[in-house]
Structure formats: C-alpha cells, structure tokens
Image (cartoon, rainbow, N blue to C red):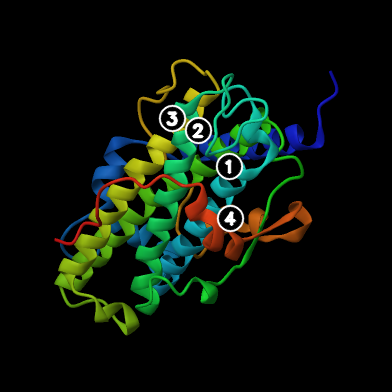
Amino acid sequence: MKKTELESQIENIAQARLDRRKFFRQAGYFGLGAAASGLALTGTPARAQSNPYQTQDTTAEILTAFLIAEDLASTFYYNGLVGAVIQDPNLAGPGGSATNVGTGGNPGNVDYLRAALFQELEHAQIFRNLLTGKPNASSADPYQTFYFPAGTFDTLSSFLGILDALENAFIGAYITVIQEFSVKAALAASGKLTGADAKYSAKQYEIFAKSATSIMGVECEHRVLGRVIGNENPANNLTYESTDTLQSIYNGPHSAVVALTPFLTSSTGPGYSFQQVITDARLVYVQTSGSPISN
C-alpha cells in the first residue's frame, strides 16, 4: 500500500529520534555512571562543563521554551477533540463529539484527551506566570499559530503518531531541564550564578526542578494513554523514559527548541490558532485535580 504524505512525515520524525538515540548510546550518554558523575551538587558540575549548550541556556530561555511547548500541546489536544478524528470508534464514534460520545464510541478514551487538554493549559500558566507574572495573558505568548502535517486531525493513526512524537519530545525535554535546574540550584547555592539567572535562589531552582518532575509524570501518562487509545499492548512499553536525544532546552542543535521548530513553521502544514484554543477549550476539556509544587 502506498504511504500517505502524513505517514511518511511521522516515520521521518520517529526515525530521526531513533538516529539521535543511536548517537547518544555510542557517545555513552545513557550510562548510569555518566548520569551520576554528570550532576555534582557542589562546585562546578562536570556535566555543565561538558555540555556548553546547557550552560548557555538562561532561565528565561528555558521558561520560554516550555511555554511554547505547552501552548503547542494545548493546540494539539484541542484540535484532536474538535477535528474529524474524534468520530473514530476508539474515541466518540461515528456522529459523536467530545461532549456527546456516540453509542459506538469509547467515553473513557475521549476523557483521556479532554483531561490532557486541561492539564497542558494549566502547565502553560505556570511558565507564563514565571515569565510575566500574568498567567492568563496568553495573547502575549511568543507563538499564536502552530502548524501540523496535513491530515493530523483527520484519522486516529495520524493523530496518535503525532501524539507519540510530541509526548516523547516533551518527556525528553523535562528530563533534561530537571538536570539544568539542579545544576543552577547548585551554582546558586555557591554564589556562582550571574546575570538574570542570579535573581532566583537555590531553593527556587530546587522547586523548579521538582515542578518539572511533576509535569513530566503527567506527560508520561499522556504518552501511555495515547497507546491505550490505539490499542497498543503493552501500553506501558518502556522500562525507562529517555531524553529523546535532547542535550539542552534552548541552545544548540539538539535542543528542545529545535525539536519544536517543525510545529512553528508554516511549511509543515495547516496552521491552527492558539487563541481559539484559549477561547473555546473550556467547552471541551475536563478539569483534573492537583496543584503546582511550591516547596
């Protein structure tokens, strides 16, 4: 059977991820010894010395990258809930919708996506608040349009392919930033942070790292629940989550920002308005419980 253009794009995204993982394995970055020695809690961290791109990442750049990522995720889940894909039998079923699941649909699967939308919007508010002090002022966010390959929201296989690619990238970014915030906490404690980064205390960076861990756990849930929707068994197929080949958040060729770039580029496919998500998300999301870590 001839592959569609979307299927080829999804395969390319997945293959790029695998190629980068191979490089990291050969370089030894997945070794437990490297992980343990790379993050020293006193002095100048060896990992920070070996990765100049992490040392270039300012706190403002990191927060900006994650705000963009969470806005992208919100846009993705919203359009999945209102696009043609919602009428797949594994979701709302023929003739169904996010808020009116048909008799041939699966209410539980739909609620997974509705909850994910709410969660991504809440995560974005944290980063927006840290950057601007205005968690609800989304109209000033760096990107107001996100681009997806044509057909992403038409069929379940296309939608879930992008879901898996995005969530793996998000998980990798959160693993990476936990390390970066931990390094900054150590440097702040020893008085070695300079510039705008120095306005945050070691305790604040520790809270940032814990908060990133908390959000990463939810992103892992999204990845697995996407596999549940696709009837992929086992849904929890990984023994360990990975950095998805990311080396930094904002700077460098293997940064989270580079991973996001296709979704910020009009040549990727149709554009989707983020402000439409902000306006109409409440009509389709399901609220979940919990609050940000504060100590």
Residue type (three-letter) at the residue carrying disc 1: Leu
Q: How packed is label 3: few (under 14 Cα within 10 Å), some, or many (20 or more)?
A: many
Percent across and percent down for residue 276 are 60, 61
Pointer 4 residue: 260
**Separation of marks 1 and 3 at Cα, in angstroms:** 18 Å
Q: How packed is label 1: few (under 14 Cα within 10 Å), some, or many (20 or more)?
A: many
**Separation of marks 3 and 2 at Cα, in angstroms:** 14 Å
Pointer 1 residue: 81
Nearest to viewer (mark 3 / mark 2): 2
Pointer 2 residue: 110
Proximity of marks 1 and 2: CB atoms separated by less than 8 Å: yes
Q: How packed is label 4: few (under 14 Cα within 10 Å), some, or many (20 or more)?
A: some
Occupied quadrant, residue 208? bottom left
**Separation of marks 4 and 2 at Cα, in angstroms:** 26 Å
- Point out the tag, 4 or 1, that comes first from the N-terminus: 1
Nearest to viewer (mark 4 / mark 1): 1
Q: Residue at x 35, y 64 (%)?
A: 126
**Element class at badge 4:** helix
* Vertical placement of residue 176 versus 229, above or below: below
Pointer 3 residue: 224
Percent across and percent down for residue 22 are 53, 34
**Element class at badge 2:** helix
- Point out the tag, 4 or 2, that comes first from the N-terminus: 2
